Image (cartoon, rainbow, N blue to C red):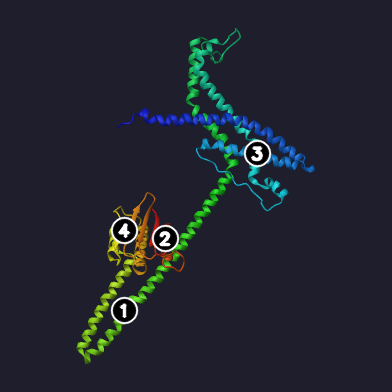
């Protein structure tokens, strides 16, 4: 189906008209609110300051501070539609441990309360400027376009001159209609930008005083949170690397190293037997060859755990298929083929499944295990579930603690559900 230009432009026109309505009502309502704010805040503030010496001024000052806080709350709600987002209520200082007098005086030492007061006192300046421009442009647009319908009814005397005549145009009625119509077209054509600029002038003044400090505080908090997450990921990466190195060292010590020691002893014995008992020497060498093959198999298994070639060459789906085929527990694999992912994500997902299947084979007494890998828009979801004895935990000292570090180092989250006797469900969410 072909979309016409008019159909494509209709949503834009509705958006422009809606924004003009929002900005116009914001400015028209802001002018009387600005007059009310300065009429109340200025006299009450100075009255409170002037009578502070006889203590009557303190309640007046407190009342003024809470009044301008209410006006600020209204203004934050008003500027939200202008910017197209909602503004959060800022932080106001509280002193719950202070006495009644201390709590009453808290607004006097709160920076945001003083910013609210400044806004209430000076907001009439941008409000008045914006009001003048909006009223002028709306009057010019509506009056100019409709002048031909009512201009004839205006009384005119010998000394009366309207705008076209003052500018040197012909005094005929048709010329006046054309002049005012052209002026109306000009004001209507520039109405959106002028009204928008006027509304933003008033709205940015309010935003800077009423929400600027709070926005800055939220940005600092977000930066600190991001730094904290980065530090946690770094610590998790270091911990995961240390755990992997310790495990590799243990596996080499318990496996290939012991076999190589035995191989050296067997070859030494065979060397001595060749002179006295060649048949026994040949048997020892044959046994040594068997030890050599087993050692190579263990080294290959260890290398697959570090960086399996099939994962690098053929991708995650092929690597998981090979991993499921080597598991001693029957595995149901749900891993559809999709495009290659970031190598770090693929490696972490493979490590999650490999470690999980190893734990299932060693500790779960499960009869079956389900491995599911699903790709979402923002991440990769890896799930391993078995029907074993349960009881797994992410706590430090348990076998899954290193796996949790590995996932957090990649920016992901690991969750384990493992009630005793109810099987184990391990879920890892990895961001892409």
Check residue 407 in the rendering and tell me which mark sits there, or answer none.
none
Q: Position of residue 72 (x, y in %)?
A: 61, 39
**Residue at the spot x=52%, y=40% of the render?**
86
Q: Is residue 27 above or below residue 180?
A: below
Estimate the spatial distance between the alpha carbons at disc 2 and disc 4, rounded to whole Å.
22 Å
N-terminal of the two: label 4 or label 1? 1
* Element under disc 2: strand
N-terminal of the two: label 3 or label 2? 3
The quarter of the displayed image where residue 112 is located: top right
Please name which of the two marks, 3 or 2, marks the residue nearer to the observer.
Answer: 2
**Residue at the spot x=37%, y=54% of the render?**
380
Estimate the spatial distance between the alpha carbons at disc 3 and disc 2, rounded to whole Å.
51 Å
Residue that extends furthest to the front in the rendered view of this protein: 421
Foreground residue, 188 or 170? 188
How many dots with numbers? 4
Residue tagged 2: 416
The quarter of the displayed image where residue 331 is located: bottom left
Foreground residue, 371 or 125? 371
Residue tagged 3: 68
Number of residues whose C-alpha sits closer than 10 Å to that of mark 4, classed few (under 14), some (14–19) or many (20 or more) = many
Estimate the spatial distance between the alpha carbons at disc 4 and disc 3, rounded to whole Å.
61 Å
Residue tagged 1: 259
The quarter of the displayed image where residue 30 is located: top right
Residue that extends furthest to the left in the rendered view of this protein: 279
* Element under disc 4: helix
Q: Quadrant of the N terminus?
A: top left
Residue that extends furthest to the right in the rendered view of this protein: 54
Q: Is residue 409 above or below residue 362?
A: above
N-terminal of the two: label 4 or label 3? 3
N-terminal of the two: label 2 or label 4? 4
Residue tagged 4: 316
Q: Position of residue 394 (x, y in %)?
A: 44, 64
């Amino acid at each position: 189906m072909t979309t016409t230009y008019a159909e494509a432009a209709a949503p834009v026109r509705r958006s422009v008209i809606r924004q003009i309505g929002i900005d116009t009502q914001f400015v028209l309502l802001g002018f009387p609110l600005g007059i009310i704010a300065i009429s109340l805040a200025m006299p009450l503030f100075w009255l409170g300051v002037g009578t502070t010496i006889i203590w009557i001024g303190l309640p007046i000052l407190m009342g003024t501070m809470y009044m301008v806080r209410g006006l600020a709350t209204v203004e934050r709600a008003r500027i939200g539609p202008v910017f197209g987002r909602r503004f959060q209520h800022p932080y106001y200082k509280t002193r719950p441990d202070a006495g009644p007098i201390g709590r009453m005086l808290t607004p006097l030492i709160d920076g945001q309360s003083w910013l609210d007061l400044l806004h209430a006192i000076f907001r009439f300046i941008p409000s008045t400027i914006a009001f003048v421009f909006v009223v002028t442009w709306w009057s010019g647009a509506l009056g100019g376009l409709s002048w031909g319908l009512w201009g004839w009814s205006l009384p005119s005397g010998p000394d009366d001159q309207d705008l076209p005549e003052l500018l040197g145009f012909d005094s005929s009625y048709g010329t006046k209609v054309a002049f005012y119509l052209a002026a109306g077209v000009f004001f209507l054509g520039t109405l959106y930008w002028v009204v928008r600029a006027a509304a933003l002038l008033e709205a940015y003044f309010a935003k800077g005083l009423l929400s600027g400090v709070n926005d800055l505080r939220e940005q600092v908090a977000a930066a600190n949170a991001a730094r904290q997450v980065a530090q946690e990921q770094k610590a998790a990466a270091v911990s995961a690397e240390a755990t992997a190195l310790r495990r590799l060292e243990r596996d080499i010590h318990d496996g290939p190293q012991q076999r190589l020691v035995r191989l050296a002893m067997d070859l030494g014995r065979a060397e001595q037997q060749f002179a006295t008992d060649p048949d026994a020497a040949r048997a020892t060498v044959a046994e040594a060859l068997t030890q050599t093959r087993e050692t190579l198999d263990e080294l290959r298994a260890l290398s697959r755990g570090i960086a399996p070639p099939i994962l690098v060459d053929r991708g995650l789906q092929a690597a998981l298929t090979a991993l499921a085929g080597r598991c001693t527990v029957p595995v149901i694999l749900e891993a559809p083929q999709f495009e290659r992912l970031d190598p770090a994500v693929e490696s972490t997902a493979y490590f999650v499944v490999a470690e999980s299947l190893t734990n299932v084979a060693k500790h779960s007494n499960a009869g079956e295990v389900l491995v599911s890998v699903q790709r979402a828009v923002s991440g990769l979801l890896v799930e391993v579930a078995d029907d074993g004895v349960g009881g797994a935990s992410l706590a430090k000292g348990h076998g899954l603690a290193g796996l949790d570090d590995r996932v957090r180092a990649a920016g992901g989250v690991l969750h384990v559900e493992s009630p005793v006797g109810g099987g184990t469900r391990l879920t890892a969410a990895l961001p892409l």
